[in-house]
Image: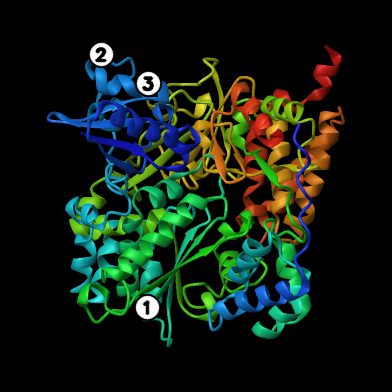
């Protein structure tokens, strides 16, 4: 087994404020800029740093609470960096119709964790529809889509995140 | 040698990228010059990855392909075990009336020249020299109705925006396709993005809107990438921008990305989200047509409604209206999914029966066990039993049966389906995704999960409670999330009553 990957350190304060300022500048004058800003921050840092709320609020003439309220509303925005490997398993109806519950159990077994858990480098999350409903059950590993999720595919995912 | 391999997300999820790489390497080994074209998908998802090879007779299909199947494409295509014959002759494709999806799977999605060569841009060209009022008349006369599910006449919506006075109007495309069983929006955006752009530009000309947004859910990274590139290409080519096709009309387009909230598929919460707010529902009236994005007149249309527009403009309202039944005119891109043998997208005129869709076109279940229930219209649609197979697929007939066609996604379940479990899931999903604005949805969905759990545990007193709760949610919710969650729940109870009577099970 390889050595565990070093834990990602939070960005240095200077880097943080610089990054936030860059993102804000890129969206100056845009109508309804908050979601695009939050997406860019998350792309930059891996999460939306709470340290950014004040600067966003000032730039968009909102209160800090309004910014926090928007961040909190949407499932996508994270307050802390995600695990290195994020596996999203679809739980919606079309995947359920293709033995979704059994697939979930097998994936949980292969990864040694339950849906909704994060263990070490790996997070297993639920997602509601990836639009792969005609090749269900489906999952997303990082940004790679996997359809027809059978035992071979599950084993490959477990192998990939263990590597 | 010209070889086509889809780049659609479903095809990629089934290994299309590996197959494409195998094509390149097999060609290299043999010293064969290959032009590899990545297309959208033809929509026959059970055959993905579907590889096509151009021949004098037409494009020949092979699928579902694995990298190991690729060498034989070069060495012995005639006797290839995955050979399917001419693509256009595959019955699933041949039976369709492909208007909106005519180019999907055929061309490189970002090749604007190929788009024009296959009939693209004709509608916009016509619209750019037509009076706005007349463009609206065409759309109204075609009978086109909102393909997102509500079925509101598109022409009437456009006319409202056309006559509204404001310094700025907007076209907003709802591409927040969150319904399980639905993937038509994704398929179109990935496979033929210029059709959507063209439809939006026509909507802009028709209503006087000079700015458009496509709001795409974040779960569709491929569609986001393709649409962003397509907007750049279309702007550079003068298809949109300061002067649409050299006319006096301006139309700018921006791609926006959702953030994992199902409720943002509802038009008013989508508008709030687009404005940078929490995606909570707004009370209607005022209608978005008058008070939409930033309080200004806004057309909010589904991807499929807007993508139908170029064909209507190019071929005339009557040609579109000639297809369909009753008040459901034109074609509907059905999405056949779940436990089904031949899953995929099937565009056809309204009026085909549910039984034809599931059994003839879909081929019955993938598991080979009998069909038990078909959920039509996404997570808010009803569960239809086999006895509903005679229903004609159109807005009115499904509404009359306590259901809805929604975004025309169908999820087939075989006899292993646990109807109480599915009813519980509907409530659970509503609880997770509720925006929290209105009480029947926010609290009702949570109580719904608890009450169904009581029922599962054998408490029969819970049955009238769940029915009563559904009634409250239906009548008291602000939007379709809380208002329609009762559809799957009540239809499951009505059509499969034995599964909601746990006391019998206990007595056995």
> From the viewer's perspective, is the residue at label 3 or at label 1 nearer?
3
Q: Of the two numbered discs 3 and 2 on the same chain, state the one appearing first in sequence.
A: 3
Alpha carbons under labels 2 and 1: distance apart: 55 Å
Quote the CA–CA distance across marks 3 and 1. Answer: 49 Å
Relative vertical location of residue A19 with respect to residue B84 in this rendering, above or below: below
Query: Residue B39's image quarter?
Result: top left
Q: Earlier in the sequence, mark 2 or mark 1?
A: 2
Please tell me whether mark 1 sits on a helix, a strand or a loop. Answer: loop
- Colour scheme in use: rainbow
- Quadrant containing the N terminus of chain A is top right
Chain letter behind tag 3: B
Tell me if mark 1 has few (under 14), some (14-19) or many (20+) residues whose alpha carbon lies within 10 angstroms of its own: many
- Are dots 3 and 2 in contact, CB under 8 Å? no
Badges 2 and 1, same chain = yes
**Residue B137 position within the rendered picture, expressed as x and y whole percent measured from the top left:** 26, 68
Q: Which mark is residue B210?
A: 1
Residue at the location (49% across, 25% down)? B340
Vertical side of B438 occupied by B14: above or below = above
Please state which of residues B439 and B470 is positioned toward the viewer in this rendering: B439
Q: Is residue A32 above or below residue B122?
A: below
Give the Cα distance between marks 3 and 2.
12 Å
Circle 3 residues within 10 Å: few <14, some 14–19, many ≥20: some
Name the residue tied to disc 2: B79
- Reading the image, the residue beneath label 3 is B69
The subunit carrying tag 1 is B
Q: Nearer the viewer, residue B143 or A21?
A: A21
Q: Can residue B66 be seen from the camera position used here?
A: no
Quarter occupied by residue B204? bottom left
Whether labels 3 and 1 belong to a single chain: the reply is: yes
Q: Residue A119: horizontal and vertical position, in percent? A: 81, 41
């Amino acid at each position: 087994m390889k050595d565990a990957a070093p834990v990602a350190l939070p960005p240095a304060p200077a880097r943080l404020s610089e990054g936030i300022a860059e993102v804000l500048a890129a969206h100056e004058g845009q109508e309804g800029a908050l979601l695009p800003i939050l997406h860019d921050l998350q792309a930059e840092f891996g999460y939306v740093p709470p340290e950014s709320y004040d600067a966003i609020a000032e730039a968009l003439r909102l209160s800090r609470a309004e910014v926090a309220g928007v961040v909190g509303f949407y499932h996508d925005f994270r307050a802390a960096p995600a695990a290195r490997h994020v596996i999203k398993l679809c739980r919606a109806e079309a995947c359920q119709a293709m033995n979704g519950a059994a697939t979930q159990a097998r994936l949980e077994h292969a990864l040694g964790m339950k849906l909704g858990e994060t263990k070490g480098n790996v997070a297993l999350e639920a997602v509601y529809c990836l639009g792969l409903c005609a090749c269900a059950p489906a999952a997303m590993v990082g940004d790679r889509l996997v359809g027809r999720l059978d035992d071979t595919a599950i084993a490959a995912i477990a192998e990939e995140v263990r590597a | 040698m010209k070889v086509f391999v889809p780049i659609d997300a479903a095809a990629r999820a089934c290994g299309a990228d590996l197959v494409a790489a195998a094509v390149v390497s097999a060609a290299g080994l043999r010293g064969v010059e290959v032009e590899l074209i990545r297309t959208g998908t033809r929509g026959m998802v059970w055959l993905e990855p579907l590889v096509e090879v151009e021949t004098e007779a037409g494009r020949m299909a092979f699928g579902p392909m694995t990298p190991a199947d690729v060498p034989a494409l070069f060495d012995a295509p005639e006797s290839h075990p995955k050979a399917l014959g001419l693509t256009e002759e595959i019955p699933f494709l041949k039976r369709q009336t492909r208007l909106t999806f005519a180019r999907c799977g055929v061309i490189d999605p970002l090749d604007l020249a190929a788009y024009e060569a296959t009939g693209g841009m004709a509608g916009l060209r016509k619209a750019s020299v037509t009076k706005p009022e007349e463009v609206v008349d065409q759309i109204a006369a075609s009978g086109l109705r909102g393909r997102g599910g509500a079925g509101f006449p598109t022409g009437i919506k456009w006319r409202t925006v056309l006559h509204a006075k404001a310094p700025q109007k907007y076209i907003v495309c709802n591409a927040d396709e969150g319904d399980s069983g639905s993937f038509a929006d994704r398929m179109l955006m990935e496979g033929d993005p210029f059709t959507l752009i063209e439809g939006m530009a026509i909507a802009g000309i028709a209503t006087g809107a000079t700015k458009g947004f496509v709001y795409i859910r974040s779960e569709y990274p491929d569609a986001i990438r393709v649409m962003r590139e397509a907007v750049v290409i279309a702007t550079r080519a003068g298809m949109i921008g300061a002067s649409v096709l050299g006319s006096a009309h301006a139309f700018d387009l921006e791609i926006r990305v959702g953030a994992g909230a199902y409720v943002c598929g509802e038009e008013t919460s989508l508008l709030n989200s687009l404005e940078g707010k929490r995606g909570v529902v707004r009370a209607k009236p005022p209608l978005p047509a008058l008070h939409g994005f930033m309080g200004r007149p806004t057309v909010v249309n589904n991807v499929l409604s807007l993508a139908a527009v170029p064909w209507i403009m190019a071929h005339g309202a009557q040609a579109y209206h000639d297809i369909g039944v009753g008040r459901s005119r034109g074609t509907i891109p059905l999405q056949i999914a779940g436990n089904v043998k031949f899953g995929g997208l099937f565009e056809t005129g309204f009026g085909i029966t549910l039984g034809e869709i599931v059994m003839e076109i879909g081929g019955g279940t993938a598991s080979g066990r009998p069909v038990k229930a078909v959920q039509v219209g996404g997570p808010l649609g009803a569960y239809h039993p086999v006895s509903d197979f005679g229903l004609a697929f159109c807005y009115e007939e499904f509404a009359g049966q306590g259901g809805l066609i929604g975004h025309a996604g169908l999820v087939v379940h075989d006899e292993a389906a646990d109807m109480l479990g599915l009813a519980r899931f509907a409530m659970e999903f509503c609880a997770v995704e509720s925006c929290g604005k209105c009480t029947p949805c926010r609290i009702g969905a949570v109580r719904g999960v608890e009450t169904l759990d009581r029922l599962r545990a054998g408490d029969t007193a819970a049955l009238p409670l769940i029915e009563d709760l559904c009634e409250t949610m239906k009548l008291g919710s602000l939007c379709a999330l809380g208002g329609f969650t009762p559809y799957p729940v009540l239809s499951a109870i009505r059509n499969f009553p034995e599964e909601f009577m746990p006391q019998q099970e206990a007595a056995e």
